[in-house]
Amino acid sequence: MTSAPLTDPKDRLIVALDLSSVGAAESIVARLGDSVTFYKIGYELGFAGGLGFARELIADGKKVFIDFKLHDIGNTVARGVASLAALGASFATVHAYPQTMRAAMEGKGASPLRILAVTVLTSYDAADLAEAGYSASVEETVARRVVQAREIGIDGIVCAPTDATRVRTLLGPKGAIVTPGVRPDGAASGDQKRVATPYAAIRAGADHLVVGRPIVASPDPAAAARAVQAEIAAALAAS
Ligand SMILES: O=C(O)c1cc(=O)[nH]c(=O)n1[C@@H]1O[C@H](COP(=O)(O)O)[C@@H](O)[C@H]1O
């Protein structure tokens, strides 16, 4: 069963709490206040007590995306996903391998957890895929994985904002499109290779934007989040 999409405009921005301690995450969440409703916890915070913090965020009414990009034998993936469903997470990621996606969809059972399949990482370009042994292009690999994800009935796709328009065509109207690799004009790309602005990402059809360093490493995280939300609102108004 596919759960209802999260359609509140505030939920469009997901702030990646890529921070080394729960204390640092608490401080950013306090500075962001009510303006941010949705947080992502990945390896760095997750392996430093972040799952307990996820429970606190959920108890405070925030939505939480657990981003461990699971990929293992089916039994392990299904049971890991069942634990994330019990935690109360809204989103969880798996790599877009068919066996892994099927196991994750089985593991979440009837819970409202939505499984997102990561297609081709936003830090990868054609040379990185070739180095990893793939002969297909980035576009072909994304397309193949989206079609497989759709056939499995996945809840959503993680892709680069530059892929979003094509992903929506292949995925159909159901299913969330979540794009990291989002950079406001002038922000450093860092290790991201396939990027777009918040405005362009929403115009390309992204439902949710994941933004980390441009907000959490900013001297004024609340102002940085407001600027991203203003771009999201402008893009929605223009759509
Ligand atoms: O699954 C993800 O969220 C993800 C997929 C992907 O292809 N690229 C990507 O950057 N991410 C995550 O999105 C966040 C982006 O962070 P910033 O580059 O700091 O905005 C990080 O937490 C990444 O782990």
Image (cartoon, helix red, strand yellow):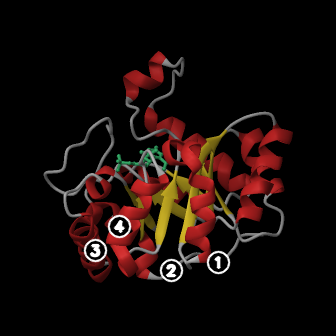
Mark 4 or 2, closer to the camera = 2
State how far apart marks 3 and 2 are (Cα): 15 Å
Other residues around mark 1 within 10 Å, as few (<14) / some (14–19) / many (≥20): few
- Dot 2 amino acid type: Thr
Camera-nearest residue between 224 and 97:
224
For residue 141, say whether it is visible: yes
In the displayed orientation, state which residue is furthest to the front.
Answer: 23
Horizontal and vertical percent for residue 88?
Answer: 69, 68
Other residues around mark 3 within 10 Å, as few (<14) / some (14–19) / many (≥20): some
- Dot 4 amino acid type: Ile
The tag earlier along the polypeptide, 4 or 2, is 2
Q: What secondary structure is found at the residue carrying circle 4?
A: helix
Residue shown at 21%/70% (left/top)? 223
Other residues around mark 2 within 10 Å, as few (<14) / some (14–19) / many (≥20): few
Disc 1, disc 2: CB below 8 Å? yes
Disc 3, disc 1: CB below 8 Å? no
Disc 3, disc 4: CB below 8 Å? yes
Q: What secondary structure is found at the residue carrying circle 3?
A: helix
State how far apart marks 1 and 2 are (Cα): 9 Å
Camera-nearest residue between 49 and 140:
49
Horizontal and vertical percent for residue 229?
Answer: 29, 73
> What's the mark number on residue 235?
3
Q: Which residue is mark 4?
A: 202
For residue 206, say whether it is visible: no
The tag earlier along the polypeptide, 3 or 2, is 2
- Dot 3 amino acid type: Ala
> What's the mark number on residue 7?
2
The tag earlier along the polypeptide, 3 or 1, is 1
State how far apart marks 3 and 4 are (Cα): 6 Å
Residue shown at 32%/35% (left/top)? 191
Quadrant of the drawing holding the C terminus: bottom left
Q: Which residue is mark 1?
A: 4
